[in-house]
Amino acid sequence: MIEKQHRKQTRQIRLGSVLIGGGAPISIQSMTNTLTADVPSTLAQIESLQSAGCEIIRVAVLDEADAKAIKAIRKGIRIPLVADIHFDHKLALLAIKNGVDGLRINPGNIGSQEKVRLVVAAARDWGVPIRIGVNSGSLPKAVLQTFGVTAEGLVEAALSHVRILEKLKFNELKISVKASSVPLMIDSYRLLSQKVDYPLHLGVTEAGTEYAGIIKSAAAIGTLLSEGIGDTIRVSLTADPVREVIAAKEILKALELKKGLNLVSCPTCGRTKIDLIALTNQVEKALLPWSETPLTIAVMGCAVNGPGEAREADFGIAGGSGEGLLFARGEIVKKVSEKSLVRELVKLVRAAYPL
């Protein structure tokens, strides 16, 4: 387990009701893909994300209608709301006026110093932190000419924005330096972590489809978190945003940075006499209501792997031919038919952990 004292100690900021950095739990973020001005659709998607475990949600603000919709959206959700804005300082000011909790905006891209000053003044007055976000695919020409697409280039691009805010004595910020290349992303965050003590938002940008994107994100985000780097994360996928949240939770649980349901299942082999793949999927679905419960469930394919090898599990199944054993902490509870295994397992879990 990655103990708190092994994590990089960063400044702490407050984003609505969520603390970020300074030893606070690592938070999970996602972003809606609805039209922000379509308030009912946006609220429905955020409700799904909240239920899945999302702790911070970001919406795109492309025009005045989106910025004005923030007021109604903010009233209808339970988690902090971040407005993603590019170039237009007026949209940032309008988003703040309508109650947004945070901004994702790069101050170097919104025009004159006076425009930046206006946004910073409003953010300070309303207690709204800013995330500076740099991506490897959109580095400024001057940075590309000097550094190329390198960790040094990403970090310099981020620090150029940081210096603008620091000059205005604004320090309520977090930073991201995302890349689609896993090694480049890791190197960039490592370098940035050496140079600043602001909280860092981790993510692999343009990670791809669900399968490939989860693997890239787990490799990159997991590596950095295991080194104590990172305060908040997003698993970016070309998929339903709910899948991003589920993947992020699994990464945190795998590193023992977050408590919750831990499903252990063995790989299939020639000894398996039960449809282990289908059974495991059924168990995972049936136990979704316990996803936040610190509970280990084992689904084993035969008597060789269970219950002995899964004695540390709170509850589990060992499959047989048309039947299986239910066990609790290594002790056999009873034998039941294959079609009853999931139902009987849920009964055991519910008796010990009532919802």
Image (cartoon, rainbow, N blue to C red):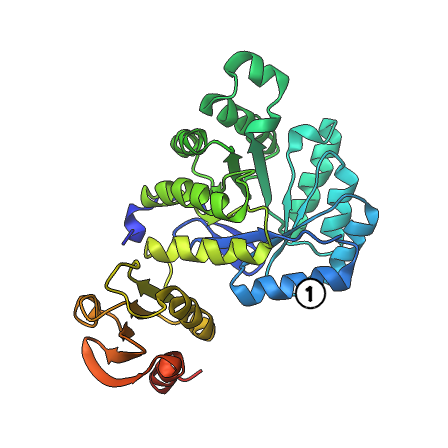
Q: Amino acid at mark 1?
A: Ala
Q: Residue 84 appears in which quarter of the rendering?
A: top right
- Residue indicated by mark 1: 44
x and y percent of residue 281 in the render?
Answer: 43, 67
Residue closer to the observer: 311 or 23: 311
Q: Residue 169 appears in which quarter of the rendering?
A: top right
x and y percent of residue 241 in the render?
Answer: 59, 54
Residue drawn at (40%, 72%) of the image: 283
Outermost right residue:
65
Residue closer to the observer: 301 or 355: 301
Residue drawn at (42%, 67%) of the image: 278
Question: With 97 as the anchor, is 252 left or right in this view?
Answer: left
Residue drawn at (77%, 43%) of the image: 62
Residue closer to the observer: 132 or 256: 256
x and y percent of residue 72 in the render?
Answer: 76, 63
x and y percent of residue 280 in the render?
Answer: 38, 67
